[in-house]
Image: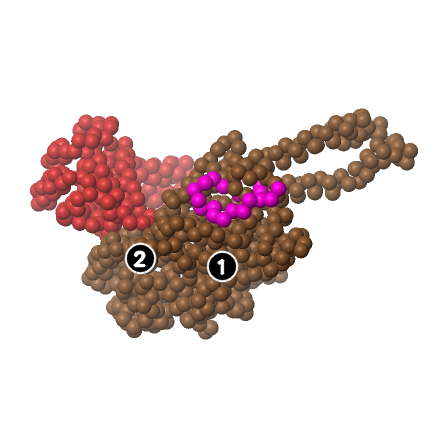
Chain colours: A brown, B red
Amino acid sequence: MRPTRVTNLADGDWHRLHPASPLLRGGLVLIAVLGFIIANLRERLVDMFLVVFAPDLGRDVDGRVDVWRDDWANDPIGGIVSNGLTGWAIAGLAVVVLAVIAGFWLSWRMHTFRITNEAVEVRSGILFRSHRSARLDRIQGINVSRPLFARLFGTAKLEVSVAGQSANVHLAYLGSSLADGLRADILRLASGARAAKAAAVTDAATGMHPASAPNGAAPGEVQRENGHGVRNPVAAVIGQRVDELLAPELDPSLAPPESVVHLPLGRVIGSTLLGGSTIWAIILVALIGTGLVTGQLWMLFSFVPAAIGLVSYAWSRITKSLRYSIAGTPDGVRIGHGLLSTGNQTIPPGRIHAIEATQWLFWRPFGWWSVRINVAGQSVSSSNDAAQRTLVLPVGTVADVHRVLALLLPDAIGEVDRFIDPGLAGRDGAGGYSRTVRRGAWLRPFSWRRIGWAATGGIALIRRGWLVRRLTLVPLARMQSVAVTAGPIERMLRLATVRIHTVTGPVSAVVPVVERPEAFALFERLAAEAIERAANDTSLHWRAEVAAASGAPSPANAEHFHAG
Amino acid sequence: MPELPDAPTPTPPPGTEAQLGEVAEGAPAHERTMDDRAAADAPAAGVAPRDTGWLRVSPKYIVVEVVGSVIGMVVFVGAALVLHATTNQAWALWAAVALGVVSLVGIALEPRRVRSIAYRLRQDDLLFRRGIMFQRQVAVPYGRMQLVDITRGPVARALGLADLKFVTAAASTGVTVPGIPVEEADRLRDELVALAETRRAGL
């Protein structure tokens, strides 16, 4: 049966996921278990076939039949065969397999989602039903990830992240191009541009059945009308898979070319080797070496796991930085990465709560910087995945930092741009930054000359750090609160610390050792400006006024639909 | 001892004056009473409040803090003494003495510490400050409040006090105004939730 072509999934109806989803989610484990069992039983199965179908050949096998018969506990298969229960056993096995398949099919049937004008909703579960919905105006970002296995099936996982711990809505798995289309649809709906949906935008959207269509076609049977033609469906599908695997995660032609940061492989490897973990690696190697030399084996056992962890960290950092790309789209910044398992993340405008460019001492000769952000809901856990998502620029030059900040702060970059260079490397009030007093050196002996702040265009910029140079930018429209603190020593020196509180993440916005009156002035200024900026912030529905002005569906839709 | 309020009463208060009579230190008490009345008269929903000036928490909160410190002191000093009695270690005795002295100094400073806690409702945000040694002042815009939490420990409940906790999307905000009379806390909560609702803009 031909699948009905779906042109738009965001129509408010309930839809199903890709038919291979249960297999991809949990079924691979089952296949692995089956394979393991079969591999281990191969000898026995051969024996059994001899007993059942060619009794004359298996003289020595016959000798063992009596043993099998008495040894049910240790050898149920032998018992089955020798008692002539083979037919029943096969029937039972068939029932189990059918039950598993039926379970998969049922879980696929019951797992539906819909995208309305207000929310993304997912219903799932056979016995215990769950219904989860994410409000569109609370969406903090959309991630499309393609693990290697899913890529072989031409599918992708869509994750709608909302603020809150483990509150994300997962759509696993969707057809690969369909996931891209759906992301664009969700973002369009969330942007407030509630114009009539442009039909026929998802020409490449296949591999997905509407809820009404029965499960007829396996994923591999879907034909596509792209460059491969329809001469041979299998060849076409394979060709398309290869194309998808080789295609860059983010099509560079979609974005303005100058905004795409290019990350050479050498820089990725070099920056990882010169990263902060290098010191740990040296310490570990030294410890393990002394352990070996002095014959203290316990040192070996206690530090080798740490070394393995370090190596795997470096490896994952390198592989995830490969084919890194960042580009601005009308619906936010899109960051792609990954070689075999790829992923990309779209952060709509107005979802970035803090940005920090850092440069660790060893990176200074090369002029390398990395950029991290605070985003609500994603960076709560310290897992590798979350750390990856908050890392916007793994390593880049100053020019790259300018480009990335221009993408992250599109509205304010005009005013902020001239503060970036003095903020990254400057000191002593260069470039419009405040400078702290000399007695700050008692508390910050190395970095006191670098400590300074500036505020422009609704962005607070904080410059600090000597060992690790930091430039922190906080859009005041999303500041949660501000605090000024002073401990006993600070009070003795008539100094204070100002902290801007944002959502949890790798970035913390702190201005240490500010002169006391200045600290309170800054406190008042930030408090007042944050209220004013938040009141005038329209980035929640970032395209509402655009749509209202043009009165037509946004032309940006078509840009997101790029099939492999 | 005051009555045990077991359910939050929705009716706001001229009842607060009962507690205010006990304010020990002179001048701010009058200000506070007036401010409280002014704030209580303001309608709860959505109207920008006037600047209330700095408001202190109830002096009875000193009792809560002292009870907590005394319990802590008893536990730690007792543990050190038991250690001394069982193992006959001299340092355990010294530790007990040191702990006791430190705790007593802390208890003696308790009134000043509690007096340093103050909050202030301004037109668009809430200010909170506390601390003598480690001073801290926080400003939370009303629109950023995700929820307002009222918690009451056993001692505070016996004294008719409650803690008002303000939660924003930032975990580090950490604003908890302790020692507010229960009716006042309920009224503040309703007023601030209504304010947060009207001022809310995104996350």
**Mark 1 is on which residue type?**
Gly
Q: Which residue is mark 2?
A: A549
Residue type pointed to by label 2: Ala
Query: Which span is picked out in magenta?
Result: A1-22
Q: Image check: A242 left or right of A337?
A: right
Q: Position of residue A527 (x, y in %)?
A: 23, 55
Please say whether residue A365 is visible from this viewpoint. Answer: yes
A247 part of magenta stretch: no
Quadrant for the N terminus of chain A in the image: top right
Instruction: Sort mark 1 into few (<14), some (14-19) or many (20+) by Cα contacts within 10 Å.
Output: many
Q: Which mark is residue A336?
A: 1
What is the C-alpha distance between the residues marked 1 and 2? 32 Å
Query: What x and y, as percent, mark residue A238?
Result: 65, 55
| Dot 1 or dot 2, earlier in sequence | 1
Q: Residue B150, how many percent across, how many down?
A: 27, 37
Q: Which residue: 46% across, 66% down?
A: A260
